[in-house]
Amino acid sequence: MWRRSRRRTRQSVVVVIELSVVTTMFRSAPYLLEFHRRVSGEAAKLTDDYEILFVNDGSPDESLAIALTLRETDSHVKVVDLSRNFGHHKAMMTGLRHAAGKRIFLIDCDLEEEPELLGRFDAVLAANPQADVVYGVQSARKGAWFERISGKLHYAILHALWDLQLPENVVVARLMTRRYVDNLIAHPESELVISGLWLSTGFSQLPVPIVKHDKGSSTYDLRRKSALMIRSITAFSDKPLVYIAYFGFAISALSVIYTVYLISRFLFFGRAPEGYTSLIVSVWLLGGMIIFSVGIVAIYLSVMFVEIKRRPLTVVREVYERENRDG
């Protein structure tokens, strides 16, 4: 039987258990009971020293009440209640910071990713002791045509702008070692993109093909996906700024060449510059590009503005866990 140990930090002594299951809740009430039943059964196959950590990301439905009811009947359940909705990525990072397991299984609770992946990932991790992460990748992207096309566009843009190569159709579900998670949660970003941090943290990571089910709706609408794309670019790439510099240099070079052409035509052929329409089009083109370029720089400045203030990632209203778990 695996034994519980203790991990000493600068501030306190933290109890370390064998396995933590971390999930977030936002409009998750219809799925929680089945998720708890299935993930509990899977965790119990591996060890009886585990915790299931529910992070309530300001869910407007009955998710918190259901999770607290589960806590009353299951000593393995722990609930972290955030003071408001901070967003999926921040809620996941908060959950990882509260997890005490030697191995941490991160998964969404909407059952699109099967809780039974825990046993499958654990077998892969046990067979590859050099690895620190086993994560799921969709064999074929789920969803309707819009989700599939927007997903392909998302990854195409990231592959063009990121130095990190994010696997296509990666999912949340992943099993991680303690040392990997300790380094992951050490990142101090306020406006974080957790998929990029998964990669930039490094260590040996193994992909496993999975099938992700489609529950028919998603909290990631077009606005949220667009905001995530912008954060992903500004958090891990400075290429847009470099491209602006290249574009400015190209426009300057073309302007010099065209100026030389006009002067030569006037000196040698006596033809003065003409063309009101081309002049207006040029002004509109350059004006639009200047505004666009300034907008990109402004986005980077806004990200810096948020990071410099060093506000906390999330605010925890309450942490609910059963006392005397060892007893």
Image (cartoon, grey):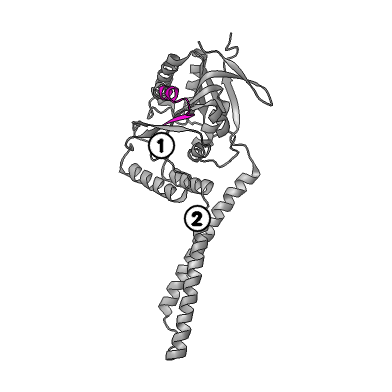
Q: Quadrant of residue 218?
A: top left
Query: Is residue 134 highlighted in magenta?
Result: yes
Query: Is residue 32 highlighted in magenta?
Result: no
- Residue 277 x %, y %: 41, 77
Horizontal side of 221 relative to 103 (left or right) equals left
Residue 314 against residue 248 in the figure, above or below: above
Amino acid at the residue labelled 1: Val
- Residue 32 x %, y %: 43, 23
Q: Which residue is mark 2?
A: 240
Spatial CA span between label 1 and label 2: 24 Å
Marked residue nearer the N-terminal end (1 or 2):
1
Q: Residue at x 51, y 36 (%)?
A: 202
In magenta, the rendered stretch is 121-135
Q: Nearer the viewer, residue 301 or 247?
A: 247
Q: Looking at the rendering, in which quadrant would you find the C terminus?
A: top right
Q: Can see residue 83?
A: no
Q: Quadrant of residue 145?
A: top left
Q: Residues within 10 Å of mark 2 (few under 14, many from 20)?
A: some
Q: Residues within 10 Å of mark 1 (few under 14, many from 20)?
A: some
Amino acid at the residue labelled 2: Pro
The number of numbered discs placed on residues in the rendered structure image is 2
Q: Residue at x 46, y 69 (%)?
A: 284
Q: Which residue is mark 1?
A: 170
Q: Can see residue 246?
A: yes
Q: Please, what secondary structure does the residue beneath circle 2 have?
A: helix
- Residue 3 x %, y %: 55, 13
- Residue 17 x %, y %: 55, 18
Horizontal side of 216 relative to 1 (left or right) equals left
